[in-house]
Amino acid sequence: MKLAKRAGSALFSLAIVTSLALFLIFPARYSKAVFDGISLWAASVLPATLPFLFLTALFSNLGIYRKTARFLSPAMGKLFAVSGEGGCAALLSALSGYPVGARTVADLAAGGRLGREEVFRVASLATTSGPAFLVGAVGCGMMQSPSCGYILYFSHLAGIILVCLLMRIRAKPAPSPPPLQSAKKTDLSDLLLNSALSVLCVGAAIALFYAFGQMIADMGALLSLPTPVTTLLCGLLEMTTGCALCAPYASPAAMAACCFFVTFGGLCVLVQEGAFLRRAGVKMLPFALVKFLQGLLSAGICFLLSLALF
């Protein structure tokens, strides 16, 4: 165990030193990569994410959210051993995508609306991509096929749900739903400020990891690494780049790889989610392992379903 920790620490240090050296040696190239990442965030992520972060934060403070949570509570308790509040967070995540689910989990936990024993299970269930990315961006945009997008989205959710069903086996019973209370007065200025700070955090992660992905591509070309190896490294770092590299191949294997990258999220998404989930007490290493398992299962489902297309 100590040897593995030392090896991991050494690899991490090497990656940091190499990245710093590349920034110093080729400042123009990688500054441009950071700028391109910011442009991608500003053009594609900011317009969709900021409204969702603000509106979901506002929605979670309304009485209708509490009523929906009480309605979902029996089914969510039996299936996943989580409360109705956690079920609502999962539903919002499935419709909105990263990082809305993680932000909602953090807000609910901070408000005492999630039990301590269920936070990790809710986080595992409520951190998903949304149809706008998988169906719109990957399916229609990258693969030129809405059918591919729907298969990716279904497989993505199926893998996450199946792993969370397994996690329920050793879980304690879900906490009883809190008494239904009247909606509290909401400070729109605070919600807007928190949403803006959250989306800036997302933008910083995208810009930095976009540059790191360019470094990996450059190193792969320099070392003559096989294309699948470079694609895997880029996808594990940043899922959008991984999907873009897989999309042209149009095969069940490429579909499965895309589904794995999106479900696992890559280091970029894990960093974004960690900015919220750590506040809720979620330990990121076990969480990353769960997302990795969900990614493998989703990829297997996607491979089998996509055999009908190719």
Image: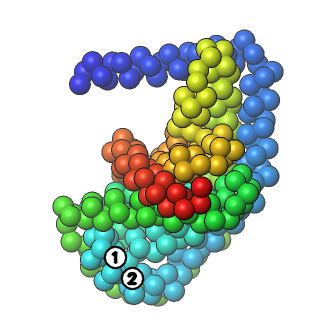
Residue 190 visible in the picture: no
Say which mark, if any, is on residue 62.
Answer: none
Residue at position x 78%, y 23% from top? 29
Say which of 276 and 75 sits in front. Answer: 75
Point out residue 98 in the picture as x, y percentages from the top left corner.
57, 57
Q: What residue type is labelled 2?
A: Leu
So how many labels did they put on this image? 2
Residue 114 visible in the picture: yes
* Residue 50, above or below 71: above
Say which of 83 and 223 sits in front. Answer: 223
Residue at position x 59%, y 55% from top? 310
Residue at position x 78%, y 37% from top? 36
Say which of 273 and 201 sits in front. Answer: 273
Point out residue 269 in the picture as x, y percentages from the top left corner.
54, 46
Which residue carries the number 2 mark? Answer: 72
Secondary structure under the numbered disc 1 in the rendered image: helix
Point out residue 257 in the picture as x, y percentages from the top left corner.
53, 45
Q: Which amino acid does label 1 sit on?
A: Met
Q: Image quadrant of residue 187?
A: bottom right
In the picture, measured across the screen, residue 68 lies left or right of residue 78, that is right
Which residue carries the number 1 mark? Answer: 76
Cβ–Cβ under 8 Å for marks 1 and 2: yes
Point out residue 277 in the picture as x, y percentages from the top left corner.
44, 52
Secondary structure under the numbered disc 2 in the rendered image: helix
